[in-house]
Image: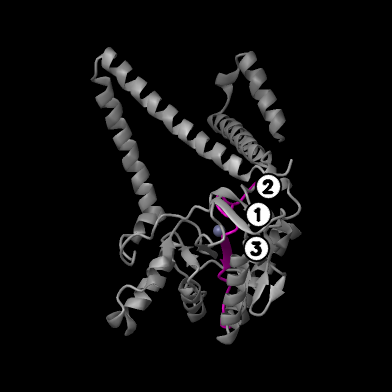
Amino acid sequence: MPKLDLSKRLHSLLLYGKLSRLPVFYMVLLCSIALTQLSAQFHSSAWAKRERLPWTKAKTPSKGQAQSIGSYANGCLQGAASLPAQGPGFKSIRRFRHRYFAHPESINLVRKLGKAVQEKQLTPIEVGDLSQVRGGLMAYGHRSHQSGLDVDVWFGGDATYLQTEAKRRLQKLKRKAKKKKWSAKKLKQKRFDIEHPSLISGWRELIDQKVWSKRHQTLLRLAAEQEEVARIFVHFRIKEQMCTLYKASPEFKTQPEPLWLRKLRPWYGHHQHFHIRLHCPKDSLECDNQGPLPKGLGCEGLSWFSKVEQKERKLAEKDTEEQRKQEFAMFSKQEQAKIKAERAQKRKERIKAKAEKRALLLQRCAHLAPK
Ligand SMILES: [Zn+2]
């Protein structure tokens, strides 16, 4: 039954007072449909707001010398260079997204990595999103990648995976698609996921041993060893894996805290691709670097990022919130009003600071924004 008919029916039932005759399951169904519609509306309006930003409209790089301006998640890019569709040891993918632009230093880094990968006779790297032609906030997909200094590289699989496991998965997929009558679009997406596999599997988020290979280990180290690289974001299990492998190697005894391993930072997602972040280039005087790396290898407490611990934290937060409410209720009305006013003031200050930051950036980037 179409959604519209259901909601019309609910409306008429409410009007004529027949709601009590509805079976329970029918009511649950109606509520869930209403909720889905509401959330869809919320999401589409959030995206629409992003779409209105000028940066997605730009078609050509701006004139002027290459400059990364602002920060990674609040910036823009002057005089962008573009990554070619392919080169020695690398391939640029998903070019229909028009995010193959960056500061020339990022493009050089891709070329350098490609060459190193080729020298080591590894499968070429596949490079995904860099930045838009003038940087800035994208309509979907990323908060960062705004100043031409963020590069996504897909993990992909090594030759063994591609020749055995990927083929097996593809055959299984084809059978499933036929049985379930999937659309060509859906099949294409699933195919992409097999050819660009996640390194993580299952609810415990463990390393998928059928996908993980020496190539991934070499690739991550190669990328992190580049001087211009500030950080690389990977799934926490991948960081954990790199830590375990390094600590078991003889190198660990003589070099207990190598910079390259410190640069690998755990972050959500990043199990199908890793995210390279470059330092601000010397030519970009208005570029804001991220803070320094935390001390130590960063190999401890990684499960903080796991879904299991996230869930536990959420539950604990609920309890704390409940406790806070109870404590608040014990204050006098006058004190409650005072606390509320203080909270409102703090919220106001935060919003103001955010708006000021945004306004300052708009000022710095105004000459690049397309009308
Ligand atoms: Zn990224």
Q: Is 233 inside the magenta-drawn segment?
A: no
Say what amino acid the circle numbered 1 marks: Gln
Name above or below for residue 315 compared with residue 150. above
Lower sequence index among marks 2 and 3: 3
Instruction: Give me the disc on residue 368.
Output: 2
The mark found on residue 96 in the picture is none
**Which badge, 1 or 2, is on the more N-terminal residue?**
1
Query: What's the amino acid at mark 2?
Result: Leu
Magenta stretch, main secondary structure class: loop
Ligand 1 neighbours mark 1 (CB distance < 8 Å): no
* Residue 100, position as x, y percentages in the image: 68, 61
Q: Is residue 356 something one can see in this rendering?
A: yes
Measured from the top left, where is residue 203 in percent x and y?
44, 59
Query: In the image, which disc is placed on residue 190?
Result: 3
Query: Which of these two is toward me, 141 or 200?
Result: 141
Please state the extent of the stretch shown in magenta in the rendering.
Answer: 139-160
Q: Are marks 1 and 2 in contact (CB under 8 Å)?
A: yes
> Quarter of the image holding residue 189?
bottom right
Query: What distance separates the C-alpha of mark 2 from that of mark 3?
Result: 38 Å
Task: Look at label 3 and name its amino acid.
Answer: Lys
Q: Quadrant of ligand 1?
A: bottom right
In the picture, which quadrant includes the N terminus? top right
Task: Give the residue pinned by disc 1.
Answer: 78
Above or below: residue 341 compared with residue 239: above
Residue name at image x 71 percent, y 53 percent: 62
Instruction: Say which element carries label 3.
Output: helix
